[in-house]
Amino acid sequence: MKIRSKFLLLLLFISHGFSGFSMAAQQKATIILHDELVPVAPKEFYIANVTDERSDRSAVAWLVSPAKTANQPEKYAVDLQGGCLVAIKGFIGHNLQRNNELRPITIGLKKFMVTEIALANGLVEGHAIAVMEFSLQHDDDEMLHLVDYNDNITYTRSPGPPQDIEPTLRHMLENGLVYLNIWMNRQAGTNILLAKFLKITFTDYMEKPEGDSIYYSAKRLLTWDDFKSKIPNSRYDAEVFPSIGYDERTDVTNGVINVGLAIKVSLPKSAAWVRNGSMNDYTLNHEQRHFDIAKIAAEHFEQKLKVENLTTTNFEGIINVDYLDAYREMDALQKQYDDETRHGADQAEQERWNKKIDNELSLVISH
């Protein structure tokens, strides 16, 4: 009887010892991502960086313990060997071709996790999810969001070692990289975010048949028939209201952003007026010079843009700023012109401005 009692105590000791070792092993367990070449050869990108943006970075998996699979099963957390970020960077570095001459892409890990639940039949069901954000990194370190990838995998397995779920995690990562490769190949030639070069062209906006607006042309001078507005309560003999603007057309072809600006120098007939008895060549010339000044400001706008450092990520704002500068220049010149000629009453000053405007027109139009 004494020998049997000692034997039972020894069994209990051994049983508790093995139980404690099992839990410790679970706490220390990690998942090793196996090397496996990603089945793509990127021609448009390389992975420059991976950032960990998960809300919970403590582990990648919460697994059901093999020792307890039903009635409130115990779970334990498992991470990738070396940590999630280090392991994924290492996997990509070893298994995806890299050409630093291509576009640098950063992967933002939003989610990368597995959670398991125990089933009544003694098996466990796992739910794996990966959410990745792909962004393009520019030379100025600006990050442009391109596209997101979401993957969900459900599996059933017998409770076992954490390494059993490694293929699931690895395949989610590979699937994301394959998706990115397909997306980049399809988008590289036409997506404005992926464009490598920018080309800007200028044309003079014209409208045929001519409507209410007259668009500037050296061959289309003002006539008194263009003055359609009723005479307002004003002390002047005639008045016109020229303006400048542009229509923009943008498309992407073979990775080049083509920006076409149709420059508008216009004058509405419905706003132009003249007093009876003032329809003479001198007055008409004064009003024509207002139209010429608008043309000069528009040409300055075009010339300034031609020497700007326009890039694929920074051209819209520069175009808009330069346009506003040109518009302000036009307003200032119009006021200066009327002030110095006293709205055409000072014939000597008018002649000086005629020559000044002709000289400036010959310079800007010749360029």
Image: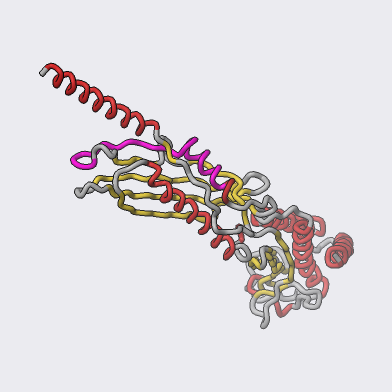
Q: Indicate the quadrant where residue 13 lies.
A: top left
Instruction: State left or right for residue 308 relative to residue 251.
Output: right
Is residue 73 shown in magenta?
yes
Q: Residue at the spot x=81%, y=71% of the render?
A: 285
Q: Quadrant of the C terminus?
A: bottom right
Query: 288 and 196: which one is in front?
Result: 196
**Direction from residue 282 to residue 171 in the image, left or right:** left
How far from the left and from the top, in percent, is residue 94?
A: 58, 46
Occupied quadrant, residue 358: bottom right
Residue 45: image x %, image y %? Answer: 62, 55
Depth check, front residue: 61 or 159: 159
Q: Position of residue 322 (x, y in %)?
A: 71, 55
Which residue corresponds to the image point at 25% horizontal and 25% vertical from the top-left? 14
Q: Nearer the viewer, residue 319 or 29?
A: 29
Q: Which residues are drawn in magenta? A: 69-92
Nearer to us in this view, 319 or 223? 319
Question: Can I make out residue 264 in this image?
Answer: no
